[in-house]
Image: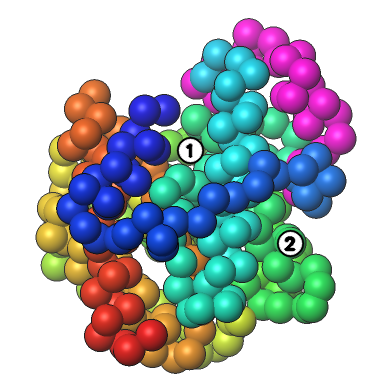
Amino acid sequence: MGKFSRVLHFLIKDQVITEKQVWVPEIASIDLLSCVHTEEYLSNFINGKINEQEQRRTGFPWSEGIVRRCRYETGGTVLAAEVALQRGMACSTAGGTHHAFPSYGSGYCLLNDLAVAAKYLISSPKRKVLIVDLDVHQGDGTAFIFKDESCVFTFSVHCGKNFPLRKQQSDLDISVEDGLEDKEYLSTVEAHLPWVLETFRPDLVLYDAGVDPHWEDELGRLSLTDQGLYQRDLYVMKTVVSRGVPVAAVIGGGYSRDIDKLAIRHSIVHRAATQVWRECGM
């Protein structure tokens, strides 16, 4: 959990952003969360009625602190989406909890922030939202939630032999092999993203910029470098905004015992966003 505050620390320390660019979200209300999650699950999660088996499935012991953090994280993704609609681009310093299902958490994900933000955005006025999920693990919770929703398109590029064992069906799933490196990975994204944008024509893109495809990631199984992640993020955001579509990015998954190193890796998407912002004259 320590990585989240460190992402912001390094962004300010390295002068990628200034304090004036930092917006603080409101905590996600139960009413907002209920557009995705069941009443029973929210009640149990918020009030600590989560049994040991359920806690093992999420990977987290329950605490009031984790409930608060997850609710603020979801609020942050909603805020990033709102700011992106106003200004063209925004990045959260958290988010991407795509394994959470309506009635349970899974795989270090307790509330599905991407799904909540997308549901919120398509409700009023009616919008179309594209979720581009480049975390190394398939966003199974998000895929399940939107399987029958025509206003949300789920696009996932993930390692086929990685978690989750049982995949859900996204609108477009691209499964890649272990050990994939920078050039081949980027070519895979380039081969599909323009087609998705042109055929679905979203009003907003939610981009999960997980850094767990990195070669040093403890749960990744792919072989991207820092530069490979940077080029990936640069390509995705430039491709989206050049078509006049707003993009809101979240940091997604990343796993390392070296928290500062991981936080700097997570800040790659913000550094790429800053370059896109300058190059596109936003």
> Looking at the image, which residue sits at the far top?
52
**SS state under label 2:** helix
Name which quarter of the figure residue 100 lies in. top right
Asked if residue 140 lies left or right of residue 121, the reply is left
Look at discs 2 and 1 and give the one toward the viewer: 2
Give the amino acid type for the residue marked by disc 1 in the picture. Pro
Residue 68 horizontal/vertical position (percent)? 62, 30
> Dot 1: within a 10 Å radius of its alpha carbon, few (fewer than 14), some, or many (20 or more) residues?
some
Residue 207 horizontal/vertical position (percent)? 46, 63
Which residue is more in the foreground, 204 or 76? 76
Which residue is at a point 81% across and 73% down the rendered structure image?
Answer: 124
Asked if residue 182 lies left or right of residue 124, the reply is left
Which mark, residue 120? 2
Q: Is residue 82 above or below residue 114?
A: below
Q: Answer yes or no: is residue 36 visible.
A: yes
Of the two numbered discs 2 and 1 on the same chain, state the one appearing first in sequence: 2
